[in-house]
Amino acid sequence: MDLSFLKALRASVRLTLASLKRDSKRLHRATEDVFGRTYSLSTCQEAYARARGFRNWREAETILKRGGRDSSTPFWKIDSRTDAHETVFSSIVTAELEMTENGPVCFFGAQSDAIVPALCLWAESLSLAEIPGLLLVDTEAAALQDTSLWHAVIAMGLTGTFDEFRFIDARNDNIPLAFSTTAADWVRSLLYALPDEARAELTDSGFSALLERAIAASAAKRGEDDDQVFADTVESVLRSLCQKSPVFPTYLFKATDDTEVGSLRGDFDAYIERQRPDAVAQLADLGRLVGKKGMRLGRHLAQESVRRPTVVLYDAKQAASVVLASIVHSLYYWRYIGMELRYNDIYTRPVLFYSDTADPQVPQFIQQSGASHTCIVNGPARTYAQAWPESQAARSRFVYVDSGSFVYAGRRIAFKSEVAPVVAEPSRALAV
């Protein structure tokens, strides 16, 4: 088939989708005059899709996008915006808000209001850079659709895009994915889910350093890559080191590098002299809870995260779910830390942290990361100020959101008040 014909066909499909969206918006604005009552944009979209021969709007959007999109363009690339999305986006451009390497953008205010500009900034950052990002949701709600974040997703017409994201509910057991990350990130994720006192004891006693080195050595023995250490390796090391009477992993004696084994043994002997059994017991309990999550069979998340955005739901009160959220965060954040990457213009992926809990806190794994290229939404300023370290607050940019407008750099900028909670349609609900 002639290549020019295929290009023309793709252009025609893109035009059809654009026309369908534009006509739906026009009908939406005119429903009061035409029908004597106001219908939602989603209803008008469904009507146009049926009129064009599709079963529903979702089918029309999916088929036309896949048929008309350049194969090199990611599915989260924004090529059309609803009126509400366009208004919020315009306000962000006016304020010159952007996600940078310098630190987080913190949105203060009621979560249902603050999530609107934060979500828009995050989604537009993904679209502009054409790289996947991470959405972390600290919630007790059963599904993302039960949060105010989803109301903003609907209002900005991003439901179709979210349908293709990877969803992980870290609160559940038997998660059908294979988790892997570096030894350092495994240890970091486990420690940041522990109470401050236990974390300090494990660090000061040298146990955390011993654990990281033992995991890395065990992974090498198993033939795993440095940046792809799997859960089984971590669990085997924890079982050896977290006993009441710690045991040096015997299989490491068979390593070919005697110098490395000797160095590890020296760290082990040094730790034995300053053991912290209570803190180690807490780590052992946490390790067992994390082990029950599965994390062995299924799609390899470390590979998928390179090309697909992820949404993680977790509960800060469930330490095991915090560990999983931190591991996923490492795949979008710590994996891209390094001066050699910066020299090649490779930065951490955009991260959006959202919490709708009664006492929202910024998780330790985000606080300690520096939170570059990160948006944070977790309630009023007074609550947030208590959770964010003063040393890092100097690197943050603060945005104060209040019912349809936000204040940034001494200027109040309004975004459309129509971006308000909307009831999600059953046909658009996601299985989380």
Image (cartoon, rainbow, N blue to C red):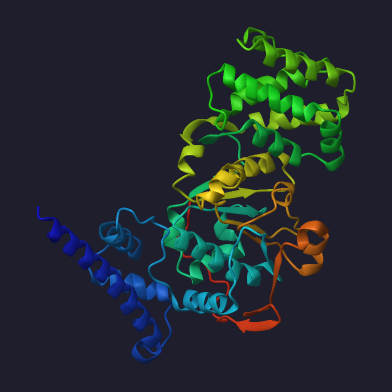
Does residue 292 appear in this view? Answer: no
- In the figure, 283 relative to 266: above or below? below
Q: Describe residue 87's horizontal placement relative to residue 281 as left or right.
A: left
Q: With respect to residue 69, does 322 lie above or below?
A: above
Front residue of this view, candidates 432 and 419: 419
> Which residue, as the protein is rendered here, is positioned at the far top?
254
| Along the viewing direction, whichever of 432 and 376 lies nearer the viewer | 376
User: Does any portion of residue 32 appear in the rendered image?
Assistant: yes
> Hey, which residue is sitting farthest left in the picture?
1
Q: Is 131 situated above or below 40?
A: above
| For residue 323, side relative to residue 144 (left or right) | right
> Position of 60 compared to 394: left or right?
left
Q: Residue at x 44, y 55 (%)?
A: 163
Residue for point 31% across, 61% down: 65
Residue 168 location (% of width, % of height): 55, 45
Residue drawn 88% across and 26% down?
276
Q: Residue at x 65, y 10 (%)?
A: 251
The answer to whether 360 appears left or right of 20 in the picture is right
Q: How many marks?
A: 0
Q: Position of residue 49 (x, y in %)?
A: 29, 69
Image x and y of residue 427, in percent: 42, 60
How far across and down, in percent of the image, does residue 111 sit?
67, 67
